[in-house]
Image (tube, grey):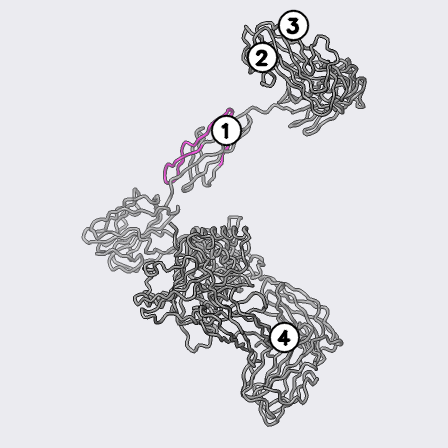
Amino acid sequence: MIQRYRFVVYVFFFIAWLPTNAQKKTPLLRCAAPDLTDAQVHRLDREAQLALSLKQASGAFASLTYVPIRPHIFRSLLGLGGIDLPKLNRVLAATNRYYMLNGTGIQFYFAGATPDYIDNDLYNLLFTVGLEDLIIGNRDASNAMNLYMVNGFDDNTLGGYAYFPANVLSSTRAIILNEVDEFDLGNRLLPHEIGHNFNLLHTHQGSTGATPELVTRGAGANCMTAGDLVCDTPADPYGRPGASVVNVNGCPQYNGTATDPQGATYNPSITNLMSYYFPCTHEFTPGQFDRLAAGLALRQSHSAYSLSYPPTAVAAPVNLSAVLAANAKTVSLSWQDMANNEMGFFVERSTNPTNAFVAVGGTGPNQTTFVDASVQSNVTYYYRIRPSNTTTGSLSPVVPVDVPVCRPTYSASCNSTNGLARVMVNGVALSTGSGCAVSGYSTTTAVTTTVGAGQTIPVSASLLNAGTSLFAAVWVDLNRNGVYESTERLASRSTASTSPLALSLTLPVGLASGVLPMRLVTATNVTPGDPCGGYAGGETEDYVLTVGTVVNCPTPTALTATNVASTSALINWSAASGPTGFGVQYRPSGFSNWTVVNVPSAPYALTGLAAGGSYEWQVLSVCGTAGSSPLSPVSSLSTPCAVPTSLTTTAISGNSAQLNWGNMNTSYRLQWRPADNPTWATVPTVTGTTFAMTSLSLTTAYQWQVAAVCPSGVVSAFTNPVSFTTTDRLVYCQPPASSCDDGDGLASFRLGSVNLSSGSGCSAGGYQSFTAVSANLLPGQPYAFTATLLSDSWPEGLAIWVDLNRNGTLEPAERLYASPGTATGSLLGTLTLPAGTASGRYLLRARVSFDNVTADPCGFVEFGETEDYSINVCSPPTATLTGSQTLTSGQAATLTAQLTGSAPWSLTVSSGAAFTSVVASPFTFTVSPAVSTTYTLSRVTNACGVGTVDGVAAVTVVAPPVLMTDLALAMTTNSRIIRTGDTCVLTVVVSNEGPRSASAIWATSLLPPHMVFVGSTQAAVTSSSGAVSIAVGTLQPDESGTFSFSVRVTDPGTYRLAAQLTAASLPDPDSYLNSGTSDGDDDMALVDLRTSEAGDSVYVSPNPNPRPLPVVQGNQPTPPATEADLSLALWASNRVPISGSVLSLSVAVTNRGGLVATNVVVQLTLPAGWSVTNGAGLSVAGPLVTVPIASIAVGQFVRAGIPVLVSGTGEQVVTAVITAATQPDTDSPHTNAYGQGEDDEASLNVRVQ
């Protein structure tokens, strides 16, 4: 069964922030369903990534995918109400804008010619979530996503929900409330829920779980396995303590203090569509687009449904026109509708005539006009109309619109009373006698003036009529983007005046050379605040400035930075006479934006710098109206990360203390240690200026130090260590005085077998401490106690607390016993410490009170008594022995005992050795056995008693190693085939393969008959009487020696030459020196060679001192005594003969049977063209040659030669088979022809040249 995952949207009751002109703020709906489990999240992620990789591998991945959505609209039974189609088109058009990034992504279209209307009075306003399947029935389209627009839920806090991808049809549903707030519906609610449909998670997924997403995107980042699994969405703390937002200018802004498990402060993206912050603007990140693509691929891989609903065949709109408004702020579009089956229209816009069209709005069916109020200045737009139930097959023609720089509008044009006559900028007349412009706007670009970056420029103007009062403002397009922005208003006259304009503006330092647009706006009714706004009267003129370099304005030199502190620095420079001021710009290294200031002279103090930061800065000279110099070269400085100050230690108790230091508006790194411990414990990140030390030991000296971690990551030096000592006891509350004079108190208290108090009587003020005596307790074990009262007259109740967390406070959860009622004389019960209670000393408090059981360990009781005791929690010890090893006789072995439970321990070893007062684990000790011994632990004890032992240490004692060396010998020849009488060179290599050096190494080779020693160039090689001796000498490990000598052969035939190592100073572990040349050890080598002349003789080196080898056991059955067991062998004197030469073939027949073989016949088959050159004793019939053999004795063989003349070339095969014998041969009957694979046949391959 496939699991469904549902995300539910709930109403969130607070005032919304909407970037519209609405006069009344409306409440927003928010998604508040539980997050998926980690297992569900990662399973879906794996499925989606697999589907996406398969789709990409198939080549089917598209940059833009159109996805059908089938709309289902709830209405009343009479067909009234429900979302109307104009609104539905506008909402889906807004949603489509969020699902396209750089021309890629998803675009939705309506499936069908009309919506599926669900007319139902019962569920129209009260859609019941629990009855979803009953209400919807079989209305889901099986080839599209399904959007259900409802008008209310049975739960009035519910706003809608959607399903994650699953291979079930119902997972295609999104059930959305038709909320009144259309902006929120199209720009947040619907795109948010469709995001879930395509596998997007909340940005705060798992934020309150055990492993939330960490803030860092560097080392240790977990953004690929936690949170929303998207690394370009910052970690979101929503739901964590300290996560909060504030309202700034009508929009939310995060101001929380929440930190992640590493102590890092969150900075979430509150504008993300999958967050819960309901901002004024919304967005997806590129990483979320990647995840949407994977979610789409997963849905396209499912078999329970498809996304193949075809676009409706709608006739394309025609006659599209686009008209720009006079103020260049809106574009009015109209078109002709040629169809009657559209579900509405999407108005799509792009800055490219062929692609990247994005919906900017929607209309209902038959609506053919639209006004685009979202255009920007200085942009060419391209528009097209798409029926909303189509993809790209019914598009209108594309029409362009050029939107120039926007301009103001005036309700009264600049008649002769309220316009500009002459405008001077930087002493240059940019317009003269221009008169009143049409519609109050004109542009003058023929005249310009050259200005410099950082220069202060005068702007003056005379008016058309001295009797008209005008306000004025000047904008300069500093970033040259064609839009005059609010930060680019550099001068204004905020008081209406009839006098000529006299303004000045200062250009920023670092302004690049080139053309710079400027606008002067005047108005009769208000100070101009909008360069494109509407005003009652006045005139606007645009001009062009030219930013250049002033030749005679000197550039500052000799830039220096002194007095550099953590947040400030004094910068200085030199400049020739002439400048009237300077412009300074500085920024953190690696940043793109500069901070610019104008200063009258050097030096200048930079303040507000970040501690531990790196900065770069430049200066230029300002030479009044003459302009400014070029910027100086960049200079750098680095601020130190200051060491914290004002260190104090407060609230010191027996187990805690508070550490304090001065605030430096940064994070910190803390180290602490016991004063007698050389190793510091480090707390890597502390975000405040205090730190609570807990779980300290009583009466112990400690040290601590702190370093600042600046925002740049630079860490300051640590402070000097600060010392403090914990007190000798935890200070617990002492109850107010109460009376036990009448016997309302404890006479004694016995816990287990220990009397914690005895005969104590009534204490002064009703309180007494007995902590000198302590009882040892085990966690999880019940211990009986007896509280004996001072009197039998009064009923008393008993309560017992134990300070389990040892924080000096007895908390409600630490009341471990409360008597079920009151009693007289004594109170009996059991006390059990929680399992897992750590070892150590704890305070136990017992309170008796008259006629009641108190729940307050420190509160007032009129009659009663309180006594404090000490208990010691310990754990039964365990000991595990390890240390099995092998050592040489006379060595010592170190064994290790791993110990648990409370120290100190006592140990007894199976050898009888005993160790007491062992205070640390692991504990090591040594043994020196003379023979192999197995050690175990016999006993372990501590204050809690006898524990359990485990483990074995087997110590194996071996004899000292015998010194050995590993020698090897190899031999090669420079020629395997030589002519009779010629020489060849034999090379012997002796190697020492370790582990020790060897000396007095000798090698010997006994030459075969008819091979004579010729000589050697090495003195170490000598020969006598056919024996070649090699004095190898000494070889170190991994060293080898190479020796060569020449020999001559005197007779034709085959020679098998052997050599062996005969002596060395150390034995060899894998071979026997001087043991002959037939045992196959690596101290011997064999080389065979033959003469080029034919010869049947084989000459072999003598084999002195052969080491006896085991008899080779044959695998053939024992031949019967009543048969002759014959086998055949065939060979040639030359396997590579020359065509036309004579080749000597030889056959050998061996008799392994029990009878003498007689009348044996061997038949050879020669290759075509071959002939016998001497047929004496043979019978030749074409290629068949018959060789008769009279008899073969038992255990003997007979050999016969057949000389043949070779012909032809290439591979040739000679075959032979025994065809007759008087005696039977069971394993190879003589009647069988060649080719049966029996031992009475043979074949020989030769290659004829």
Q: Name the residue under label 3.
A: 1190
Do the residues bearing badges 2 and 4 touch, measured as CB atoms within 8 Å?
Answer: no
The residue stretch that appears in magenta: 924-951
Q: Mark 2 points at which residue?
A: 1231
Q: What residue type is labelled 4?
A: Leu
Residue 385, above or below 494: above
Distance between mark 4 and mark 1 Cα atoms: 85 Å
Pair 4/3: label in front? 3
Pair 2/4: label in front? 2
Q: Name the residue under label 4.
A: 478
Distance between mark 1 and mark 3 Cα atoms: 74 Å
Q: How crowded is mark 3: few (under 14 residues within 10 Å), some or many (20 or more)?
A: few
Is the magenta region chiefly helix, strand or loop? Answer: strand
> What is the secondary structure assignment of the residue under circle 4?
loop
> Residue at horizontal 47%, vertical 54%?
300
Q: Residues within 10 Å of mark 4 (few under 14, many from 20)?
A: many
Q: In this view, does 890 lie to the left or right of 1080?
A: left
Residue 926 on image: x %, y %: 50, 32
Question: Looking at the image, is mark 1 or mark 3 earlier in the sequence?
Answer: 1
> Residue at horizontal 56%, vertical 57%?
718
Q: What residue type is labelled 3?
A: Ala
Residue 937 on the magenta segment: yes
Q: What residue type is labelled 2?
A: Thr
